[in-house]
Image (spheres, coloured by chain):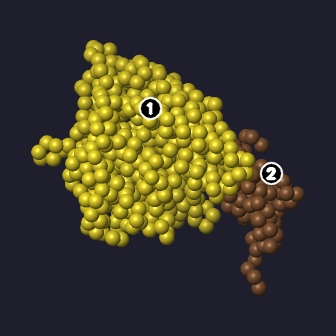
Amino acid sequence: MYKYNDFDEAFVRSRVEQFRNQVNRRIAGELTEEEFRPLRLMNGLYLQLHAYMLRVAIPYGTLNSRQMNQLAIIAEKFDKGYGHFTTRQNIQYNWPKLQDVPEILSALADVEMHALQTSGNTIRNVTADHFAGAAADEVEDPRPTAELLRQWSTDHPEFQFLPRKFKIAVSAGAADRAVVKAHDIGIQVVRNDAGETGYRVIVGGGLGRTPMIGKTIVEFLPKADLLPYVEAVVSVWNLLGRRDNKYKARIKITVHENGLDEIKRLVDERFALIRPTFSGVDQAMLRDIETHFAAPAYKNAPLDAFDDRLNSDPVFRSWVDTNVAAHKVDSYGILTISIKKHGETPGDATADQMRLMADLAEQYGHDELRISHEQNVIIPHVHKSDLPAIYDALKPAGLATANIGLISDIIACPGMDYCALATARSIPIAQEIAVRFDELKLEHEVGPLKIKISGCINACGHHHVGHIGILGLDRAGVENYQITLGGDGTEDAVVGDRTGPGFAAEDITDAIERIVRAYLDLRLNAEETFLQAYRRLGMDPFKAALYETEAKAHAAE
Amino acid sequence: MSRRFTPKVVTANHLLDGDAIWLTADNQWTRTMSEAEYIDDADRANERLAFAASQADITVGAYLADAKLGENGPEPTHFRETFRTRGPSNYAHGKQVEL
């Protein structure tokens, strides 16, 4: 993985000291909150409902055991012993004190981490496929591209005061695991007919108030053109994007209002102007970055013990079947550790859990960990012979839940339990749904089903692309939950359809159960997933199950 | 005739730890909403909000929140404000265990 050079190190350290000074001046009364707010946001520090929240960048979700251990130490020393992994592959601390934040940032710098550009109207943490470097279906590891973009966008002088935040994701597989079509810029590493590697560039995707699926602006961009091209896109939007209305400021609206053709014309014009100013230094840097992402030294070991355990222990087998994905090396697996035990907060891990995952990655996983946008932790390179030992270590720590991709593997934003912008809570709804389907013992029978919950229209919980999406709103002073069906965040990305009127908090889990039971009744066979059944049947039968049963229940009262 | 005024409290977050705080009648900041000054007059509300906003070394983001008078003092009328008096629902953290 990427190792800081002297420049990175000095830059991050200097920003810590700069912020330390700013915090001191704020506490001493030399800076007003109006002056301080943009400064703290540049360093990832929000003020939420009950406390400050620090959002720490985990670039493209990759970290090593030393970094994970440091996150655990920070959780214990400066927070309440846990952290929350987010849909941008970051970690958030919910309870830091203002005067401690410079120390936290300094502790992060000790392990080559920071909280820069995790907030504010800048280019945010670049995300990538959490299976990068391990997936069998990828053209190449997308992370060197993501790291190049991280370096380019960090402190980019032209892009510190954009019309709004700007999010970039990179994926390189046939399957899109990075939701690239819901990003301001989505980048897919592709190979053209001549066998050259390049990029498909997608612009104008985004969720939030006005969800849009991104549009391809260029089918094949030569690798060497990446930075000038992305810079051209961002700078066209920087000038054109609406600063009069924050709800219309994102590039998806700019593309929508001006049309893709016009945006493409402007981008091409800008690109022609700035392309000659890129001398090739960026490509030299990319080649250096690539050396940091060399594949690990895979080992050979007998698989007999693994096979025996698989055949003798059905609980272990279920966990392997559900949580271990195919690796490009046959004898290896990609292990997703669920941090969504039924009834727990999606994405939360205690300091002890973080340390255990770090230790396992160090001992068995070539010292690599990933955070997925689906709020789980991944050890991407695990030899199958080590899976029994890993499972036995995870189980007592509450980390062996076999639910990846199933109904209880729910994305949930922090919602109104923490977030100052939220209009309703998300976490308790996720907890209740997960517990319900665990009690019903239905989740493995239901199969692949992604529920995603947002506690406000900003859609941090990606509800629009959930197979079942739940959006929490404030309806006349009461929490109310709207349902969408049929959303999809993959390469076939589509925004879900609203079912109709929302449900009160105490009714939403029953409502979800009615939808799921309708699916079980309607599916052709156990192989037809929820999403496939929805695409075949459309909204009507699900809507009928959702509302008519409810009407009957009310009539019977 | 002016519209009927909904009673208010002045609330903010504390500069250092971000905790929810309320302004009392004697110009102090309390972490317990029921100790806040219950304001049933629009002019008084604006005056108190201006005072709160002037205390930049203690407060961040002061605003007026709707309130009703309960047995022990002001109480929230909206669920968001209720959550601010106790903390998150997924862990016993914040005011629900600290006060």
Which structural element holds mark 1? helix
**What hue does chain A carry in this figure?**
yellow
Residue under circle 2?
Answer: B30
Residue A522 coordinates in the image, percent (x, y): 32, 53
Question: Do marks 2 and 1 share a chain?
Answer: no
Q: Nearer the viewer, residue B89 or A209?
A: A209
Residue A27 visible somewhere in the drawing: yes
Q: Quadrant of the N terminus of chain A?
A: top left
Question: Relative to A285, is B13 on the left or the right?
Answer: right
Mark 2 falls within which chain? B
Residue A398 coordinates in the image, percent (x, y): 51, 29
Q: Quadrant of the C terminus of chain A?
A: bottom right
Image point (15%, 47%), residue name = A192
Q: Mark 2 Cα within 10 Å, few/some/many (few <14, many 20+)?
A: some
Mark 1 falls within which chain? A
Residue A337 coordinates in the image, percent (x, y): 43, 32
Image point (51%, 50%), residue name = A119
Q: Are marks 2 and 1 in contact (CB under 8 Å)?
A: no
Relative to A430, say whether A546 is above or below. Answer: below
User: Which three-letter amino acid code belongs to the residue tagged 1?
Assistant: Asp
Q: Which chain is brown?
A: B
Residue under circle 1?
Answer: A6
Q: Mark 1 Cα within 10 Å, few/some/many (few <14, many 20+)?
A: few
C-alpha span from label 2 to label 1: 48 Å
Question: Relative to B26, is A10 on the left or the right?
Answer: left
Image point (52%, 27%), residue name = A69
Residue B49 coordinates in the image, percent (x, y): 76, 64
Which structural element holds mark 2? strand
Q: Nearer the viewer, residue A159 or A82?
A: A159
Image quarter of residue A483: bottom left
The label shown at residue A284 is none
